[in-house]
Amino acid sequence: TGLLIIRAYHKDKGNIRKKILIPDSGHGTNPASVVLAGYEVVQIKSNEAGIIDPEDIRAVADEEVAGMMLTNPNTVGLFESNIEEIAKILHDVGALLYMDGANLNAQLGIYQPGKIGFDILHFNLHKTFSTPHGGGGPGAGAVAVTKELGQFLPVPMVTKIDGKLSLDYDRPKSIGRMHTFYGNFANDVRAYAYIRILGASGLRAVSENAILNANYLRALLKDEFDMPYETTCQHEFVLSCNRQKKKGVKALDIAKRLLDYGFHAPTVYFPLIVPEAFMIEPTETESRETLEKFAETLIAISKEAETNPEKLHHAPYNTPVRRLNEAKAARELDVSYKG
């Protein structure tokens, strides 16, 4: 939706552009979205600190760039501290800055994206506002834009005139409908209820606790695992299992072994800029006891990699099924039951 709004904005100005900038730390679906919207992807490398260098943006920012799609904090859990300078560089060449709100759980009530230069923001309701997730749906989101871009939002728009609510389809510059009927409206209602129940102070507390939990867990693990970035993280962090790989144990082995201890394995091998990546996002709801138990378990598994690496190669042992052939499952998808 956000990318189509960018396209409509430039079309309205009679200036069709070709490129969207995306950091190499961005979510994997972002390049796919760019291509679906009819743009070319221009990848921007992260620097040694794990964030985007404004000079790298300046080097490619020209009148062919329609905008930049940026997750903030980024996928390695770091806040893009140069964001205001990046926004200015883009705006100076007429491009827009689009925030992927996948990591908004770290920023609720702490800052306003529009005030630091973002023009468009989509909310991932399942990642921040408690709506269901999985099984391919029901996907639902919300999109926020600057006042200037409001005319391009999808129809219908809810309007209120003289105290009466109605649906407005008469928006000639709109990108049109994005979904049949009213979309997955129940998810929107659930997210709205979550926001109303917590209120402004409660939402800020969500982010503060998410950041606290992530940094506490990171501190517990930093001596046993490699940390690619020294900076204080936001709501998540990525560690590297490179040290363990030198002993013959991969990130995948450690993730599978975690299942034997009753912990769901985190995302592995993503983002691609971290070797043997292990992405950990504890969220605001986990107790200190759970965080410490998780850290103790990971450290124990790391020690096991030294004494009995072969055991980790065949984990898990205590689950209903053992290690699956994930490559085969991905290539030969079978989601039906044959009686």
Image: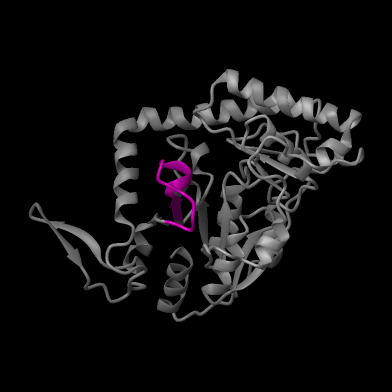
Foreground residue, 331 or 198?
A: 331
Left or right: 256 with respect to 152?
right
- Report the front residue among 329 and 273: 329
Residue 153, image x, y percentages: 34, 65
Judging depth in this view, the residue of 25 and 301 nearest the camera is: 301
Q: Position of residue 70 (x, y in %)?
A: 58, 55
Q: Is residue 14 above or below residue 134?
A: below
Give the percent coordinates (x, y) of residue 306: 90, 30
Residue 285 counted in the magenta span: no
Left or right position of 54 against 98: right
Please, is residue 55 above or below residue 314 in the view? Answer: below
Q: The N terminus is located in which quarter?
A: bottom left
- Please name the residue shown 69% across and 25% down the image: 295
Q: Is residue 132 above or below residue 212?
A: below
Instruction: State whether residue 316 is above or below residue 26.
Output: above
Q: Which residues are magenta?
A: 121-137
